[in-house]
Image (cartoon, rainbow, N blue to C red):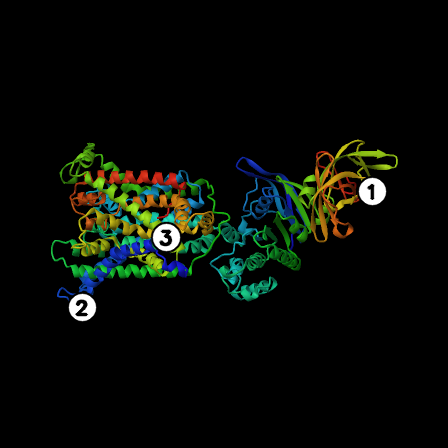
Amino acid sequence: MSVAINIENVIKRFGKDTIIDGLSLNIKEGEFFTLLGPSGCGKTTLLRMIIGFNSIEGGEIKLDEKLINHIPTNKRNMGMVFQNYAIFPHMSVKDNVAFGLKRKKMSKQEIDEKVDEILKIVKIDHLRDRMPAKLSGGQQQRVALARAIVIHPEVLLMDEPLSNLDAKLRVEMRNAIKRIQQQIGITTVYVTHDQEEALAVSDRIAVMNGGVIQQIDTPKRIYQRPANTFVATFIGQSNILDGSIVKTQAGSGIKIFDAFFAMENLSENCAYMQKVSVSIRPEEFILSRDNKEGIKGIIKSSVFLGINTNYFIELENGKEVEVIQASDSLEAIPDGSTVYLNLQTDKINVFTDDGTKNLIRWV
Amino acid sequence: MNGTNEKKLNIWNISTFVILAFAVLFIIYPMVLILYKSVISGSGQLSFDYFSKFFQKKYYWSTLINSFKVTIVATAISTILGLIMAYLLRSIVIKGNKYLNIMIVMSYLSPPFIGAYAWIQLLGRNGFITRLLNNILPVKFAGIYGFAGIVLVFSLQSFPLVYMYTSGALKSLDNSLVEAAESLGCNLLDRVRLIIVPLVTPTLLASSLLVFMRVFSDFGTPMLIGEGYKTFPVMIYGQFMGEVNTDDHFAAALCVIIIGITLLLFFLQRFLSAKFTYAMTALKPMEAVKISGFKNVLVHLLVYGIVFVAILPQLTVITTSFLKTGSGGLYTGGFTLENYYNTLLSKNNNSAILNTYLFGFAAIVIVVVLGIIISYLSARKRSFFTSTLDTLTMLPYIIPGSVLGIAFLYGFNSRPLLLSGTATLMIISLSVRRMPYTIRSSTAIIGQISPSVEEAAVSLGCNELQSFLKITVPMMLTGVLSGAIMSWVTLISELSSSIILYTSKTQTLTVAIYAEVIRSSFGNAAAYSTILTVTSILSLLVFFKISGKNDISI
C-alpha cells in the first residue's frame, strides 16, 4: 500500500515570483517525513503541490513510478490534515469521517464498519454522533486525522496540524500521530515550523529555507551534524564564533582568539589558516574559573533553571555567547567574574567562513 | 448592574427611561391602537367581524393568496440568482467585478416601484421593447402586467440583497473546508452541493426572509404593474386611502393580519438560523481563480447579462429623463433638459427634493445617536429595562411601512398628540423604520470592542461617561458612519409609510415620483428618479471611501 514520493526539479511560481526553483526530494515508502523551516520558506507550498492545490510549473512529482502532475486533487487519493482541521461544521463526527468513503460509493454497512474502526484507532469512538462545535481542539484534531486516513490514502499530508493546540496537548497529539502513523504504516509528509516537534516525530527531516532544501537527514544527525550554519542556528541553539584552521605536526585543530583546540575529525580539504565559522551549542562549552586556558570571557548575567544554569558571557571582542552548565557542578559564579571556555571538540561543528559547508569529516 | 448602581439615577438609567418612553409612544402605542381598532366595532363593542369579513369574501382573501404567490416565486428566484451571482463573482476572476458589485448594489438601492415604472416603459403595453417585438414578430405581445410583471420587478430588485449577504458569507467561508472535501474525492459540483451551499444556508435563509418581508409588504410595485392582480398591501392602501368605502376598523384588521404573518416569518427564521449556525474561522478565504476559453466567455456573458438586466430600469429612467415628452406621457423624440427645469427650478416642485434631504438627514442623526446609545446600553449595561428597550426597538423590523404609516395617522391625529401632516411625524416614522437595522449593526460593532479598553480608560481617571464619549464612541464611529450612509440611502428611497403620511408640504422625492407616474407625467418622474439615483451613487461612493471596503450589508 505504501508508496515512495519522488520529487524531481519542481518549480513553483506565483505570478512572476519563483517560490521554489528546481527542488528535488525522495521520500521513502512508509516514511514519516517532515518539511521544516521558518514561515515563508516554501514548505507549505511544496506540500500543496504534492496534493494538487498548487499547480506545478516545472519538474515532476511521482508516486512510485506514476506521474501525478496533472491528476486533479480529488483523484489523487491523498489524505490531508489541515492547520485549522477543516472539520465540516454542518456534519457530525461520523459524517465527517464517512465523507470520503461515501465519495467512493461504498455500501452503508462497510462505511459504518470502517468509521467505527478508525474512530477506535484515534480513540474518539465515544464522540461518534457529536457535532464539531462541541469538540475540543484535540478532539477536532483526531477527527481530522481519522477523516484523512480512513480513505486509505496512498500518502498522508499534514500542514502544521498541531499549531492551534496548547503546549501540553501538542505533546500528547504528536505522540498520538506518531503512534497512529506507525500502526498503519502510511507514507507521511508533515509540515511544521516547530523544530522540537519535527525532531520528536520524524523518521527524516528536510530543513528548508528560501525555497531551497538545506539538509535532509535523520533528526539526530540534523541536530548533531548540521549541514550549514542556517541549520545549526535554526535547529536548537548555536553560538557561531570566528576561527581559523591550524595544522601542526601533532595534528590539526582550530584557533579561536588565542586559544587552540585540537580536532580529530576535520575534513581533509581544510587549508592551513583557512577562516572558519565554529558552531558551538551552549551545552558544548566547558566552563572553568581556575584553568586559565581557553577562550577568555566575563559573565554578564546568569539564569538558574533547576537542572541547568545558563550563563551569558561576553568575549574579548564584545560578542556574547550563551553557555549551559549543570547546576550541581559548580557554585553559582557571580556576575562579572572572568572565566575560561573550553570546548567538547568531538561535538562542535566547523563550517566554512560563509557558513555553507560543514568541515567535519563524517558529514 | 449591581445594587448600589441600581438606586442611583445615573446617566445610563435616565437615558434608558427617556428612550423607553419614546419607544412606548411611537412604537407600542400606535401598534396597540391598531390592535384595539381591529377588534372593536364602530359602536364600541368587542367584535371579530372585521376578521371574519376578510376571510369570508374571496375578493379580500384572494389578495392574500396573490401576495403569497408573487412573494414566494420572487423570493425563490432572487435567492437562486443571488446565490449564483455571489458564487460566480467570489470564485471566478471576472473582469470589472468591482464595478459590477457597485451596479448590483445600485440596482437594489432604488425603490422597487421605480423598477416597476421603468419596466412598464420597456415592456408595458406601449413599451419600447414591446413595440420592437410586435414589429418584428407576428404574435401580439400585450405587455408584462400582473403576476409576471410583479415577479419580474421584485426578482431583479431583490436578488442583490441575497447577493450581498451571500457574498459576505462566502468570504468568511474557510477555503480549507472546500479543499478538505476535494482531497476526500469531491468534484466541483459535489463541493458546491455538499459543502458550500449547506454552509451558506443560514445566510440564504436570513436574506431570503428579508426579501420575503420586503416583497410581501411592498405596495408601490403591484400598484403600478399589477393592474388587475391585486395584492394584500394594495388592498390595505385602498381600504385606508380609497375614495369610497374606507373603513378604519377593517384596515386595522388587515394591518393586524399582515403583522401576524411577518411576525411568524420572523420567528421561523430565528428558529432556523439558530439551528443552522456554524462558527467558522476563515484562515484562508476563497480565492477567485482565472478560467479560460469557452467557459470563461459563458460566465462573463451570464454575469454581465444579469447585471445589465438588473440596472436596465435605472438606465431607462436616466435616459428618459432627457427625453422630450408630449401630452399623455408619450415621448416625442429629441433630447431636452426641460424635465430638470420643471423639477429642479419650478417653485411648486422643488420642495420635494429639499424635503427628502432634510427628512433623511434629520432621521439619520436621530437614528445614529439613539442607535449608539441603545446598542451600548443593551451590550454593556444589561438589565431588565435595557433588554426591554432592545426588544422594543427591534419591533419595527416586522412592521410593514404602510402599516406603520396607518398606525401613526390613527395615533397622532388629535390633540394632545396632534402630529399628523407635520414634518416631525415624517422624520419620526423614518427613524422608527430604520432603527432596528442601525441598532443591529451598532451592536455588532460594539461587540468587537473589548470592554477592557473602557476599563483601561476608567483606570486612568475617566468616569464612565467620559470613557464612553472619548473611547467607545470614537472607536465605533467609522463603522457607525458607514452604516449611517447606508441608512441614508435607504431612507431617501422610502415610499410605503411616506405615501400615507405626506401632505403637500411634506412631499418627498419618492412620493413625488409616485404621484408623477400615476399622473403619467413620466418626464418629471424620470428627472426626480435620476436625482434620487445620483444621490444614491454619490452616497455609495462616500460609503466606500469611509468604510474602505467593497462589501455592503444592509
Is residue B71 rendered to the left or right of residue A74?
left
Q: What's under tag 1, amino acid-wise?
A: Asn
Q: Residues within 10 Å of mark 3 (few under 14, many from 20)?
A: many
Between the C-alphas of marks 1 and 3, the distance is 74 Å
Q: In the rendering, at what x and y percent does residue B126 appear?
A: 19, 43
Rendered image quadrant of residue A354: top right
Residue B170: where, in percent of width, then height? 43, 49
Mark 2 crowdedness (10 Å alpha carbons): few <14, some 14-19, many ≥20:
few
- N-terminal of the pair, mark 2 or mark 3, is 2
Mark 2 or mark 1, whichever is nearer to me? 1
Figure quadrant of the N terminus of chain B? bottom left
Say what secondary structure mark 2 lies in.
loop
Q: Residue at x 59, y 42 (%)?
A: A42
Which of the numbered marks, if any, corresponds to residue B124? none
Q: Secondary structure at mark 3?
A: helix
Question: The residue marked by circle 3 belongs to what chain?
Answer: B
Q: Is residue B156 above or below residue A1?
A: above
Q: Are marks 2 and 1 on the same chain?
A: no
The location of residue B184, given as percent across then percent down, is 54, 54
Please state if A330 lies on the left or on the right of A88 as rendered: right
- The residue beneath circle 2 is B46
Name, please, the residue furthest toward the right: A249
Amino acid residing under circle 2:
Leu
Indicate which label's residue lies in the foreground, 2 or 3.
Answer: 3
Instruction: Name the chain letter of the residue that bears numbered label 2.
Output: B
Task: Tell me: residue A139, above or below residue B138.
Answer: below
Q: Mark 3 = which residue?
A: B375
Task: Tell me residue A153's x, y (percent).
Answer: 59, 55
Give amino acid for label 3: Ser
Q: Give the number of the mark in front: 1 or 3.
A: 1
Residue pointed to by mark 1: A291
